[in-house]
């Protein structure tokens, strides 16, 4: 198969969760893939303001952010945007008036929390994220929100989702999950990007390691799970490579003749 596009998750895939760095072998693999005419895309749950600094040095051809809800090209042309339904935002704001639930809001140009606590700080430290400003959650009512980041387990997740029927969760880990529109996901962002570039879905690959990557891995022509991925993620992939720390991206692209 002549693969023309590859989508890469960030945390635990391009970057090590232990060091938050991109290995030299992964950087080499991306560069060689582009030299061989393959387009490379970042597909992450993060907002651009929360990218690992080294990610900003990689010349991706396009970016799928907020789990595919806000997508743009390397020239900053926005080609896909899919916000949380207004009714869901209103219901969430009403819920937050009576419940102390920390939520990270991802809009087009801003990220902010309604409150913070030790659990939130633990997650921010785990992902090496910068300090986040605190704002009144009512701010979300007058702007598009592409994803919400919730620190907490499944019980807290269920409480919020009961109030937001037009949305769904995509969990990164037992510690945190994202809330996105029910119609969204990394797979929909991929479809928008491929339509823009005129690339068939069958000629695409994707790398991921977490539950929010499952729809992406099962959607593309060849889904590749990292060696450090959860078992459910590996089951959704067609191939399992080594971990991010063990040159997984380089080894897989070499195995399939991309580089």
Image: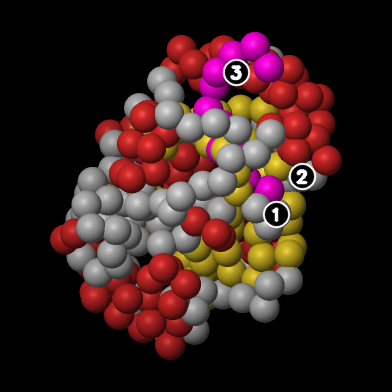
Which quadrant, please, contains the C terminus?
bottom left
Q: Is residue 105 magenta?
A: yes
The answer to the question of whether label 1 and label 2 lie on touching residues, with beta carbons closer than 8 A, is yes
Which residue sits at x=25%, y=69%? 23
Q: Answer yes or no: is residue 185 visible.
A: no
Position of 256 compared to 164: left or right?
left
Label 1 sits on residue: 108
Q: Earlier in the sequence, mark 3 or mark 1?
A: 1
Position of 207 compared to 144: left or right?
left
Label 3 sits on residue: 160
Which residue sits at x=41%, y=20%? 153
* In the depicted structure, whether residue 88 falls above or below residue 27: above
* Residue 173 location, quadrant: top left
Which quadrant, please, contains the N terminus?
bottom left
Measure the C-alpha gap from mark 3 to mark 1.
22 Å
Q: Earlier in the sequence, mark 1 or mark 2?
A: 1
Residue 233 in the image, given as x and y percentages of width and height: 35, 38
Q: Earlier in the sequence, mark 3 or mark 2?
A: 2
The one of 140 and 7 positioned closer to us in this rendering: 140
* In the depicted structure, whether residue 133 falls above or below residue 91: below
Which residue sits at x=30%, y=67%? 22
* Residue 139 location, quadrant: top right
The answer to the question of whether label 3 and label 1 lie on touching residues, with beta carbons closer than 8 A, is no
* In the depicted structure, whether residue 118 falls above or below residue 39: above
* In the depicted structure, whether residue 121 falls above or below residue 160: below
Q: Secondary structure at mark 2?
A: loop
Q: Neighbour class for label 2 at 10 Å: few (<14), some, many (≥20)?
A: many
Chain part drawn in magenta: 97-107
Q: Neighbour class for label 3 at 10 Å: few (<14), some, many (≥20)?
A: many
What number is the disc on residue 144?
2
């Amino acid at each position: 198969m002549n693969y023309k596009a590859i989508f890469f998750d960030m945390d635990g895939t391009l970057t090590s969760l232990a060091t938050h760095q991109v290995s030299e072998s992964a950087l080499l693999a991306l560069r060689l893939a582009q030299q061989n005419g393959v387009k490379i895309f970042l597909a992450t749950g993060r907002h651009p303001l929360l990218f690992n600094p080294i990610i900003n040095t990689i010349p991706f051809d396009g970016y799928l952010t907020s789990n595919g809800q806000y997508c743009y090209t390397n020239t900053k042309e926005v080609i896909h945007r899919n916000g949380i339904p207004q009714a869901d935002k209103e219901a969430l704001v009403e819920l937050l008036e009576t419940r102390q639930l920390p939520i990270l809001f991802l809009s087009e140009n801003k990220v902010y929390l309604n409150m913070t606590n030790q659990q939130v700080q633990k997650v921010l430290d785990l992902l090496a994220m910068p300090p986040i400003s605190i704002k009144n959650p009512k701010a979300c009512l007058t702007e598009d929100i592409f994803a919400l980041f919730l620190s907490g387990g499944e019980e807290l997740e269920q409480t919020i989702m009961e109030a937001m029927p037009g949305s769904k969760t995509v969990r990164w880990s037992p510690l945190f999950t994202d809330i996105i529109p029910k119609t969204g996901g990394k797979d929909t962002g991929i479809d928008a990007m491929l339509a823009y570039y005129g690339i068939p879905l069958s000629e695409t690959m994707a790398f991921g390691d977490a539950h929010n990557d499952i729809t992406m891995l099962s959607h593309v022509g060849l889904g590749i799970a990292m060696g450090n991925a959860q078992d459910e993620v590996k089951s959704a992939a067609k191939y399992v490579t080594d971990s991010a720390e063990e040159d997984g991206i380089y080894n897989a692209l070499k195995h399939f003749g991309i580089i």
